[in-house]
Image (tube, coloured by chain):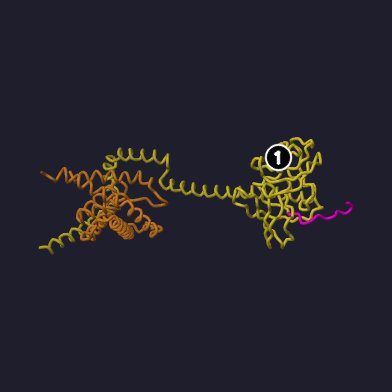
Chain colours: A yellow, B orange
Amino acid sequence: MLRLGRYKKVFFLILIVIALSFTVNITGNNRLLFNMLEYPVISLLKPVQEAFAWVSHKAQGSITSISHLFYLKRENEELKKQVAELLAYKHKFLEYSEENARLRRMLDFKEKNPEYDMVAAEVIGRDPSNWFHMIIINKGRKSGISENMAVVTERGLVGYTVDVGEDWSKVLMLLDNRMSVSAMIQRTRDNGILKGNIAPAPPGYAKMVFLPADAQIVKGDKVISSGLGGIVPKGILIGEVVEVKKESDNLTQYAIVKPAVDFQKLEEVFVIRSERALPGGE
Amino acid sequence: MRSLTYLIIAILLIIAQSTLGVLFKIGSVKPDFVLVLVLCVALIKGESIGAGYGLIIGLIEDIVYGKFLGFNALIKFLTGYFVGYGTRDLFKGPVVFTMGFVFVGTILYNLLFLTACLLFTPEYKMGIFLPQVAYSALYNALIGPAMYGAVLRLEKVLNYYFVTKY
């Protein structure tokens, strides 16, 4: 009985397949017969189809298709990538441009100061603490640098070397409290000692002490190195006076000096190895 | 009433497929919602109803979009039958299984389509067949679980209104 049922099913299956195959052949050769079926059904379904088509066209008009959305997404991602690359290029370009300008200024400085035997170095590290003002540069003994050599930029004095390795040096900067440099007021030629950032100098400023009580120093006067002490050559710009006050003993006065160099933005420096006699000079 | 509901759904889905299907096109492949419906009905209701539903849907497709009667009907009829018959003793619970059945069902449908093309329309030249089939099977497999869930839910609703009596 069960087998008969299965055969029945297979029989029907084959029958339907054969019938459909016949229909395909007949309607393929006889369009008229197919049209008789086709017209009423299509006419019946046409309104529904039109409604769906309207929805489809509306949707396509706004988003075209889901694949287009994917395409837009991909395009957007690619464009974002390109923008990121271009931004990176732009940053690099600006960086090189800045570096170029800096190096030009330094080259200019070097050419204008042929009396100094200088070696250029790059700042590779800074003291992380808030208390010391020390930098590390990438040149050392191999480049002929030793302790107590002045370090400058085209803007002015940075400090001097205090510790030198084979290919690195530590530079004590002007604002360090341990700093002591002989300096003078350029206009009045009054000598003093530039200490670091000690009271009452505000952060970022240095104090110049031991200035004569009768010195006529005014705000804006340039401070240069005096050459006394033998570390820093004479005439290097240190900064400018922003405030002058008498010491409590009234015997001397002090000046608050704003350094010419921006210590936060130091990238390249020169180490003055020695002074050489210029031909035709004294 | 159940048959009428399925017929209306089939007609609406065929029209939706022909008009809105393009919105879901990715590359050169769009999902075949109608085929997935036939496959899901075959999975849930077995080979006889699957084949019958495939036959009716195929006939409507032939009449509305076809060049001759019986071509789509034959392919969908056989697909519904084979899928229903081949999976009648298989466990169909997890979503992955449904996806797998729809994937295999779509490949079977395309093989039957290729065979029917060779038999009935030798002038029809098949294009790049395999990648197209694979992508379409994958796409159908992705929408398979949703369609399967929808058919199950429809069955529950129909059972509630037309079968279950307290």
Amino acid type at image mark 1 = Ile
Judged from this view, the residue extending furthest toward the bottom is A3
What kind of element bears circle 1? strand
Q: Quadrant of the N terminus of chain A?
A: bottom left
Position of residue A174 measured from the top left corner of the image (x, y, whole percent): 69, 48
Relative horizontal placement of residue B164, taking residue B71 as reference (left or right): left
Give, as a single range, the part of the protein colored magenta: A271-282
Relative horizontal placement of residue A248, taking residue B95 as reference (left or right): right
Q: Nearer the viewer, residue A184 or A75?
A: A184
Q: Nearer the viewer, residue A152 or B9?
A: A152
| Chain that bears disc 1 | A
Position of residue B103 measured from the top left corner of the image (x, y, whole percent): 32, 57
- Is residue B116 visible in the rendered image? The answer is no
Relative horizontal placement of residue A43, taking residue A188 as reference (left or right): left
What residue is drawn where x is 15% and y is 44%? B162
**Residue B76 falls in image quadrant:** bottom left
What is the tally of numbered marks visible in this picture? Answer: 1
Residue pointed to by mark 1: A256
- Is residue A223 visible in the rendered image? The answer is yes
- Graded by Cα atoms within 10 Å as few (under 14), some (14 to 19) or many (20 or more), the crowding at tag 1 reads many
What residue is drawn where x is 22% and y is 56%? A19
Position of residue A101 measured from the top left corner of the image (x, y, whole percent): 70, 47
Indicate yes or no whether the magenta region holds residue A275. Answer: yes
Indicate yes or no whether the magenta region holds residue B23. Answer: no
Position of residue A249 measured from the top left corner of the image (x, y, whole percent): 73, 38
